[in-house]
Amino acid sequence: MFNSIRGTLTAKGVDSVFILSGDIEWDVAMPANDIHSLALNSECRVLTWLYHREDQVKLYGFYAERRRNTFLELLKVEGIGPKGAIKIMSGISQEDLEQALENGDLTRLEAVPGLGKKTAQKMLLSLKGKLVQTQGSGAVTTPYNDLVEALVGMGYDRRKAAEAIVKAEEGINKEMPAAEKEKLLFHEAIVYLSGT
């Protein structure tokens, strides 16, 4: 279906953004933390998930693959729907959520607005160990998380994939159009990983 939308961010709300892509302006629901990561009137790429029911169609967006994965994992917890998942993700940072789940910190989860004790307990049972990525100390960070995820999906180690993207970016023209740049980065990263 839809994997992402690329366009100009024309408006930011409390829980949604408007993105102009071609002649269509999309209304995309997003967690508040992700909205803050986007700059108004600049080009952005938002990863998406389409919610479709008889009475409602809604597009949800996320700044990075890691955030979308968190949303999808939250939907697997009994009693959490798309709106609830967005609310949870708006009320706690990704790092705090991962840490609370890993440490079994029920008190921290209960402090998230709109999250009761029973749902917090279900989250602990369902999600412990599922959100934390292998990032150890000295982890490589890159704005191209979707490319890293694609490489991981091909069987490459996450850390090495991130390093390959960073290495590939060093030799690429910064003025190149974004879509073309991502294709080239992906190709160069695979070449780099094949030689290691």
Image (spheres, helix red, strand yellow):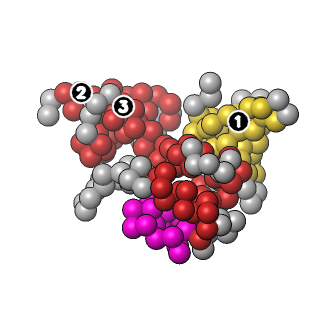
Quadrant in the rendering for residue 23: top right
Q: Earlier in the sequence, mark 1 or mark 2?
A: 1
Q: From the viewer's perspective, is 28 left or right of 182? A: right
Relative to the observer, which residue lies in front, 176 or 76? 76
Residue 136 is a magenta residue: no
Report the disc number at residue 51.
Answer: 1
Residue carrying label 3: 153
- Residue type at tag 1: Tyr
Q: Are marks 1 and 2 in contact (CB under 8 Å)?
A: no
Q: Are marks 3 and 2 in contact (CB under 8 Å)?
A: no
Q: Earlier in the sequence, mark 3 or mark 1?
A: 1
For the point 74% across and 32% down, the residue is 52
For the point 53% across and 75% down, the residue is 107
Q: Residues within 10 Å of mark 2 (few under 14, many from 20)?
A: few
Q: Could you tell me how far apart the alpha carbons at marks 3 and 2 are, in whole angstroms? A: 16 Å
Q: Could you tell me how far apart the alpha carbons at marks 1 and 2 are, in whole angstroms? A: 37 Å
- Residue type at tag 3: Gly
Nearest to the eye among marks 3 and 2: give it.
3
Q: Could you tell me how far apart the alpha carbons at marks 3 and 1 are, in whole angstroms? A: 24 Å
Q: Which residues are magenta?
A: 92-109
For the point 30% across and 55% down, the residue is 135
Secondary element under disc 3, as helix, strand or loop, is helix
Residue carrying label 2: 191
- Residue type at tag 2: Val
Relative to the observer, which residue lies in front, 159 or 131? 131
Q: Residues within 10 Å of mark 1 (few under 14, many from 20)?
A: few
